[in-house]
Amino acid sequence: MASAKPAPQSEQSPGADLQKKFYHDMLLIRRFEEKAGQLYGMGLIGGFCHLYIGQEAVVVGMQAALKKGDQIITAYRDHGHMLATGMDPKGVMAELTGRSTGYSKGKGGSMHMFSVEQNFYGGHGIVGAQVPIGTGLAFSNKYKKNGAVCVTYFGDGAANQGQVYESFNMAELWKLPVIYVIENNQYAMGTSVERSSAETDFSKRGASFNIPGEQVDGMDVEAVYAAGQKAAQYCREGKGPIILEMKTYRYRGHSMSDPAKYRTREEVQEVREKRDPIEHYGARMTEHGTVKEEDLKAMDKDIRSIVNTAAEFAQESPEPAAEELYTDVLA
Amino acid sequence: MTQILMPALSPTMEEGKLAKWLVKEGDTVKSGDILAEIETDKATMEFEAVDEGKIGKLLVPEGTEGVKVNQPIAEMAGDGESASKPAPSNRSPLVGEPKSQRDFGGGDAAPAPSPRPEAPRGASTVDRGRDLHPRGEGDKELNEPDVPAGTELVVTTVREALRDAMAEEMRRDKTVFLMGEEVAQYQGAYKISQNLLEEFGDMRVIDTPITEHGFAGLGVGAAFGGLRPIVEFMTFNFAMQAIDQIINSAAKTRYMSGGQMGCPIVFRGPNGPAARVAAQHSQDYSSWYAHIPGLKVVAPYFAADAKGLLKAAIRDPNPVIFLENEIVYGRSFPVPKVEDYLVPIGKARVVKKGAHVTLVAHSICVGMIIEAAEKLAEEGIDAELIDLRTLRPLDTGTVIESVKKTNRLVTVEQGWPVGSIGSEICSVVTSEAFDYLDAPPTKVTGKDVPMPYAANLEKLALPHVEDVIAAAKAVCYR
């Protein structure tokens, strides 16, 4: 799949400012995740930690296609989604380190974070469980007639869970405004798509419910953006749910504790060289004269500073007070 | 001549209305012909002939209510050559097949089971009433809504009370909606949602596909999205398909989000064994849900509590598991006729004051301890009766205060004994009122086996009034 294909030439094409934002937001996620991996290695982040490195174009392109009020929900590989919605890197990193200043006061951790302000509804630790919930958020939009769309992300692994199809059925039956974004990063934990899925074209997974689907180059932020815009419009017109399969790739293991022995180093290296969403997008922008090489370097410097500040904040913030053990169980 | 008997058309049906005869005396019928329409506590069913023959006398006129199961409703003569049919004394029931699409509750429309010797069930149950204002010395905390003296009490079934609660809350708050299998057009598998579709429309009373895991999760998402869903499970047995969403998504999100967002949702439906529906349809989930932090769990018995607690549950900002009981749906109790009857979640109620032993129960077993107390009184044992009403948070204070007075405790429930509600109460009472106890706290529970189908075994598997009486006597050393 070509990553450097020309951007769609239509009114949907992003202008220079948006292109820069794409690059910035993708790079922020990458640097944030690299830092998170580092802090994990230092023992400052515990438990499970699933990094989003390699998949950045998906959330950044989708987010740009949304309007204020649209909701986002995903599973546990969620740091990128949170940053894309505009959540503060400090609060996200502090949650990873289990501090009181984290988005969930340190009680949720990497896999369970929420931001009502940014319409980010988690952060869910059970594979596939976010899919009916996202469908329910879409139901609330239809009920309230607020015109909002819910983007429900899940992976190629979750796509084999039964509750996904229960959700598809109700979403189409009731014409709910939900975009199902299947992030196909080729591996359900350590099991490749070929070894786990009878139908490996996930855009077809809604066929028996009459839900249209499309395969998208998830390594190309502009392709994602274009597909996201079309999908959002489809939902807003009251036509019901739509599926976007994002063909993407994760560079790191499933979680920090995964040595990823199920694939070769060469396979990862090839994707990094030929399809990396950030490298290629930067190169495309400089080729087209949208930005200069120095501009990208300056951006990287700023982003490293943001991430370092977040990391410091996350290490300096206090742990939650012991009394917090018993708060927030019930309202 | 064979007698056609009133059929049992649901697992819990004890009587019904013979709504309409579709044959008349002298008609010849063959197998599959519809004989009559019969209204059960759940639905109107068509009743078919099984054998061929000529309709003789119609023994019960149409429109008759309260026709007992197995009561002869008509006579039928076999055709000429079948004079050697079984003698009528055999009362071989000529039971029809229900023509409903799905047999709610899972049982077959089998011939009525042999008469059950236990407590009366269904709509015919004696209304034992309730003392709405327990006036004990020092009984300042009534744990009841403030009902003015002279308030009219309307005898209401638990079924109607639940419906009224939902209707009132849906009128009050536009974000409240009901979803579940057969709640709308069918009017509820157990007729709980009667007339709600007509009043509130299909955006607020929603028939779901048979997809518990999916619609429970969808309900959670709708609650996250600012609505107040009432999710009906046709029975809580089917909620096992959905329990991940109930516990991992609904109960834990407030905590996992550091208090940013919660899940105001009610999961409700019948819980516990019905009758003759065997292991997969007869289970009491009380202790399962009571185990989970982040949930509230309610299990009322009386109609007023059903109404007041369901209204409170719908308004609660937390996920509430509302455990009903199929057999109790048809029982009638007085409900105060007040504008907005709310019963606080988390408060047990002393149903009857007593001096010698404390009997604690919830849901259908409250009826059992009331009956046991009447019999115990005849033997000079004065039992204090506590209806827990809420299982989480559990009002152990009320139980402890009672035990400090009576010095003896018996808990009663239909659930299994291991890790039961009774286990928890006995544990709390033992550690907090140990010095007051004159006998070991005792649990009466269902037996530690899956529910058997056979009538005799099923009876053995469940707790009965006699078991409660025996346990109460034992702790009184009588």
Image (spheres, helix red, strand yellow):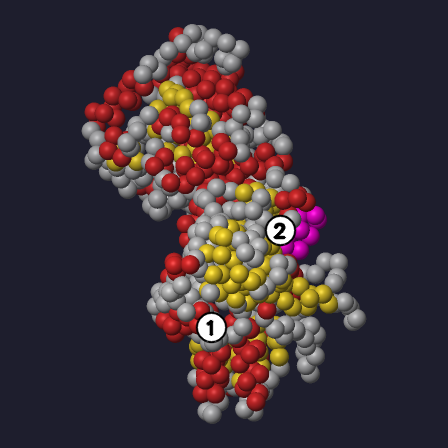
Q: What element carries label 1?
A: loop
Query: Marks 2 and 1, Cα distance to the nearest angstrom?
Result: 29 Å
- Co-location on one chain, circles 2 and 1: yes
Q: Residue furthest front?
A: B80
Name the side, left or right, on which B194 lies relative to A312. Answer: right
Q: Nearer the viewer, residue B310 or B114?
A: B114
Name the side, left or right, on which A61 lies relative to B145. Answer: left
Name the side, left or right, on which B473 lies relative to A256. Answer: right
Task: Answer whether residue A329 is magenta in the image.
Answer: no
Q: Residue B194 carries which label?
A: 2
Pointer 2 chain? B
Under mark 1, the amino acid is Arg
How many numbered dots are placed on residues in this image?
2
Q: What element carries label 2?
A: loop
Please give the range of residues in magenta. B162-173
Query: Few, some or many C-alpha atoms within 10 Å of disc 2 (few <14, some 14-19, many ≥20)?
Result: many
Name the side, left or right, on which B111 lies relative to A144. Answer: left
Q: Which residue is drawn at 52% across and 66% down?
A: B72
Q: Can residue B463 be seen in this view?
A: yes
Q: Is residue A96 visible?
A: no
Q: Residue at x 26, y 37 (%)?
A: A190
Instruction: From the image, tell me which residue sits under label 1.
Output: B116
